[in-house]
Image (cartoon, rainbow, N blue to C red):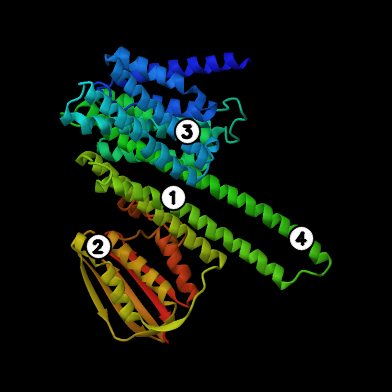
Amino acid sequence: MPIIVSYSLKFVIILVAYFITAKMGLSLDAVSGFATLVWVPTGISLAALVLFGSKLWPAIFLAAALVNLTTGAPILVALGIAIGNTLEAVVAAFLLTKFTKILEFPSFSKDVFNFVVLAGFLSTAISATIGTTSLYLGGLSQPENLINTWTAWWIGDMLGNFIFFPLIIAWKNPFSRIDKKVNLELMAFLVIIIITNLSIFFKVLEDNRFLPPLRLYFIFPVLFWAALRFEKRTVTTAIAFTSLVAILSTIAGVSPFVTSGGTLSANLLNMQTFIGITSVMILTLYAVVFEREAVQRGLENRVRERTQDLEEEKTRALRGEAKEKELEIQERDFVSVASHQLLTPLALVSGYISMLVSGKLGSVDKEAKKYLEESFHGTERMSGLVKSLLTTSRIESGYIKIEKLKFDLSKLMHDVASDLNSKLESKGLDLKLSARTPILVKADQKQTREVLTNILDNAIKYTEKGSISVTISSKRKLGQVIVSDSGIGISKEALPHIFEKFFMSKNWVIKQSESHGLGLYISKLLLGMMGGTIRVESSVGIGSTFTITLPLA
């Protein structure tokens, strides 16, 4: 195809796509008539310049000018807004091309971070600032509306990039080989995400036991499923579909983001804040999983190559201790890389949400802040799960070394109780601590602290009222800690399995859905490595008693 024909075709497609989606966005209660919280053209224009080159910027400029002229803006105002929209796309495309592997987006967590900063926060501020200034100078926006106008403009452009740019980049080769997992699992995922979105946002299959804010949580497991199991086209499509359903339900006035007496613009702000945080979180998780699998494949290849080398050395009777140590170092490197790659992006997401809640990036209304705080707690719980999984892996692989030293078990228990005092006070529980001093045991103090913290934290978690008693004593050359609570207890059927990996008693699951069934399993493993034991006695509705023993010094 001749160059001029190819350029003209791309020019027309970009112009038409920009114009149509822009008109749709401006019809949704735009602030000052021109700043809308639903602005798809940002993602379209950025993707166009990244895929086809910055030479297509005139298409964006012309489309933006026509949109604003036909919306009622004077010609100078329309040109000013068009300049801002064009600069926004050109600057973002330049920065992303320079500092990221943008055509592989979102395959790497570093690139997701750079994308959020450069295309999310930075370049969109250019368009919002120039556009708002143009409206003010043209007399279309009053001084008291400038902040609201700028905020709506900035967030709308930001969400346009977060949601639609990854979708377009992921589908840049629509006829490439389909995901290997196109099977019953993918079909089940498509059905479930449709039903889940309709249930959350359009109240289909609504269950009155779940208040509107709580319904939002049900989208996370489905999107996590996509990030963990499928390729980028499925993930970005799932995010875009969820965003579309959320937008339509908010416009229809039935979504959980609709507040009594709130304007459509205010409701869309709540919705877009939630969708923006969710999309960044899922893209980050996908990148972490992709990197982890890449590292794992690389290590598997290295291990396979090393295995072949070792077999050859075996036949020549040359395999030595140095080679075994090298393999051990490689395995430890993998654990270290996996830990870093999983936890760092989660900390990044928590940081962003914390900044939004604190108001450092602008004021957040009470309703949106509540959703942000719930999202923050969710990422913290996910970090806790990752840490528990890594601890379990390290114990099972023999990477945790036990350093047995003499220490006072009574003093350590007092320290643990002090650390958890705020949780006790928040639930109004009374802690009765009875201890002989000193009770000297020989074990690993750090790992013992983790075990005691886990057992006492569980007692607090599953006790709504009453008290918790802790007794420290010595018996038959053993130091002994007995933790008794008046909580919900454990059924007879569950007791034999309570220390198994991922096992959760049914009444525990109902009471604490954030638990993951690893704490007691880890505690038993650690105690076994230190020559200790743990056992439990419990009755449903009466409470539980955990007894921990360690060798006396």
Q: Which numbered disc, 3 or 2, marks the residue closer to the eye?
A: 3
Of residues 150 and 543, the one drawn nearer to the viewer in this rendering = 150
Q: SS of the residue at dot 4?
A: helix
CA gap between label 4 and label 2 equals: 55 Å
Q: Which numbered disc, 4 or 1, marks the residue closer to the eye?
A: 1
Q: Which numbered disc, 4 or 2, marks the residue closer to the eye?
A: 4
Q: Within 10 Å of the Cα at label 3, are there few (<14), some (14-19), or many (20+) other Cα atoms?
A: many
Q: Which numbered disc, 4 or 3, marks the residue closer to the eye?
A: 3
Q: Earlier in the sequence, mark 4 or mark 2?
A: 4
CA gap between label 4 and label 3 equals: 46 Å
- Which residue in the structure is indicated by mark 1? 345
Displayed quadrant of residue 113: top left
Q: SS of the residue at dot 2?
A: helix
Label count reads 4
Q: Quadrant of the C terminus?
A: bottom left
Q: Earlier in the sequence, mark 4 or mark 3?
A: 3
- Residue 138 percent coordinates (x, y): 23, 21
Q: Within 10 Å of the Cα at label 4, are there few (<14), some (14-19), or many (20+) other Cα atoms?
A: few
The reply to whether the C-beta atoms of the residues labelled 4 and 1 are less than 8 Å apart is: no
Q: Amino acid at mark 2?
A: Lys
Q: Which numbered disc, 3 or 1, marks the residue closer to the eye?
A: 3
CA gap between label 2 and label 1 equals: 28 Å
Q: Earlier in the sequence, mark 4 or mark 1?
A: 4
Residue 309: numbered disc: 4
Residue 423: numbered disc: 2
The reply to whether the C-beta atoms of the residues labelled 3 and 2 are less than 8 Å apart is: no
Is residue 70 toward the left or the right of residue 266 in the image?
Answer: right
